[in-house]
Amino acid sequence: MKGFLAGLGIGMGLGILFAPMSGEETRNNIRDRAGDLADQARDAMGEGRERVTRGIQAVRNTAERVAGSAGSNVGGGTATGTEGV
């Protein structure tokens, strides 16, 4: 995905530089496209952050479930070899 975005940015940059536009139009176009790329990068970071948060929550839930089942198994029985000590 990163390679695609990099290629897209390079392609747009070259297209802008070789397009028959005035300097002001070219600068405005570059600014607009850079803003679009920045928005896309922010969106991608937000999605990545959400995925990491969901992953962490899943690990916590699994750890709590395992710890709960291990705790119920430990407290339920008697230790062998300790009767009468």
Image (tube, helix red, strand yellow):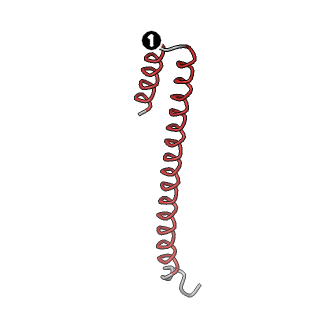
Q: Nearer the viewer, residue 9 or 15?
A: 15
Is 48 above or below relative to 16?
A: below
Q: Residue at x 50, y 63 (%)?
A: 63
Instruction: Say which residue label 1 marks.
Output: 18
Is 21 above or below relative to 52?
A: above
What secondary structure is found at the residue carrying circle 1?
helix
Q: Amino acid at mark 1?
A: Phe
Q: Position of residue 33 (x, y in %)?
A: 51, 28
Q: Residue at x 49, y 58 (%)?
A: 59
Q: Position of residue 35 (x, y in %)?
A: 55, 32
Q: Residue at x 55, y 34 (%)?
A: 38
Q: Position of residue 25 (x, y in %)?
A: 53, 19
Q: Residue at x 44, y 22 (%)?
A: 12
Is 73 above or below relative to 49?
A: below
Q: Nearer the viewer, residue 52 or 13?
A: 13
Q: Position of residue 44 (x, y in %)?
A: 49, 41
Q: Nearer the viewer, residue 67 or 80?
A: 67
Is 29 above or below relative to 14?
A: below
